[in-house]
Image (cartoon, rainbow, N blue to C red):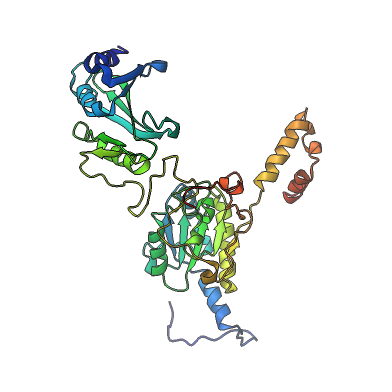
Amino acid sequence: MGDVNRSLTLDGSEQGFATTRVDALLGWARKYSLFAYPFVTACCGMEYMALTSPRYDLARFGAEAPRFSPRQSDLLWVVGTISQRQAPVLKRIYEQMMEPKYVLAFGTCASSGGFYDNYTTVAGIDKVIPTDVYIPGCPPRPEAVMDGLMLLQDRIARNERRPGVVKPRLDPVAEAKALVQIRKSAKDPREVLPAIKTEEARSLVERNGGAK
Amino acid sequence: MSQLALDKLRERFGAAILETHSQFGDDTAVVEPSAWKAVCTFLREDPALDFDMPVDLCGVDYPSRATTGRMEVVMHLYSISQKHRIRLKARVGDEDMDGAELDSVTSIWAGMNWLEREVFDMSGVKFLGHPDLRRILMYPEFEGHPLQKTYPAELTQPLVEYRTEEEAGVPLQKQEPFGPDEGMSFGRRGLPRVETDRD
């Protein structure tokens, strides 16, 4: 490995240095060394497994190392439905984490309670602990979660704690309306695209890169 | 084969079997609550019946039937040796769930232990003689029984006090696509609230 005592010098004409602010440097350092605590309670866990395994490979984003102790982790993944009975446990876990700590609500149940609108479920983990990023989806696709992670890393780099929501790539309501419109008016499947006439349907097509 | 258990029950217990039917081939007997344990013992011990497997136990609330017993406790049994099934029902409790009591059958089927705890937790039926009648799904601090129709649909009993916007320091209103209806545009949050006694 060579002489370890050799002093480091920069080659070339630029004897360079870079200027930055300490918080910007810290943010840049933190965003790629997220140690995750997966708090997995429900079916979203399947997508979490897909996300951390080689096909989607969360390691590319510097957030793959799970630490099953809250004291060693700084990103809490809340993956799944949180029942009222579990809320004290979740809060305790959050309190045991070291600063700076971030919370990611994975899926609709963790974000808002989802369709569990009843006596047993917490209507979103932000009722109990501060939450940085919400990822909608039931469960969200791994791509959506990566969007969420990158959103969080962006916030960390800019040292901003305002909560963020991952924007869905498709609006299910507009999509459903467009489908109804298509089915009502299309006699021949080849007429489907010209048959999209409503405002929602047109905007849907535009947002998805136009009619191909 | 069908009807054998019902015939035997009618012959043995007479008036304590309030009604029977075999709709769609499902043998069902409605039992006088006081005879609940005797009927269960008979079903378990009669060699021709031999119901050795407790399949399910649940409570169904019919507030309109307050005079004949509001809470219907439904038990499903199966016999592994005889390969037949039976459904037992007992109607207990008045309007205010007073007298909603049944004898525990844990001494006959040990597997009924947790099922009876669940019916107690969810529907509020007390099982007399149960070795450990505690809540099993909800937490001990929970008040009321959520599957009674009188339990307000929107009432939650959080163990952790919910955060307020002041202490959070950031707006807690949900952004799109969750919105003020918490992402449940089809849920009851969009509907006018129903007044209850607890208000």
Which sits in the foreground, B18 or A70?
B18
Left or right: where B14 falls relative to B196: left
Quadrant where the N terminus of chain B lies?
A: top left
Q: Is residue B104 above or below residue A105?
A: above
Q: Quadrant of residue B130?
A: top left
| Number of numbered callouts drawn | 0
Residue B40 in the image, given as x and y percentages of width and height: 23, 26
Q: Residue at x 23, y 35 (%)?
A: B104
Q: Is residue A192 above or below residue B14?
A: below
Left or right: where B78 falls relative to A73: left
Which sits in the foreground, B117 or A167?
B117
| Residue A59 visible (yes or no) | no
Residue A180 in the image, given as x and y percentages of width and height: 71, 36
Which sits in the foreground, B183 or A146?
B183
| Residue A152 visible (yes or no) | yes
Q: Residue at x 35, y 46 (%)?
A: B137
Q: Is residue B170 above or below residue A18?
A: above
Which sits in the foreground, A192 or A134?
A134
Q: Residue at x 49, y 59 (%)?
A: A125
Residue B47 in the image, given as x and y percentages of width and height: 18, 18
Q: Residue at x 31, y 13 (%)?
A: B3
Q: Is residue A25 above or below residue B114?
A: below
Residue A18 in the image, given as x and y percentages of width and height: 61, 84
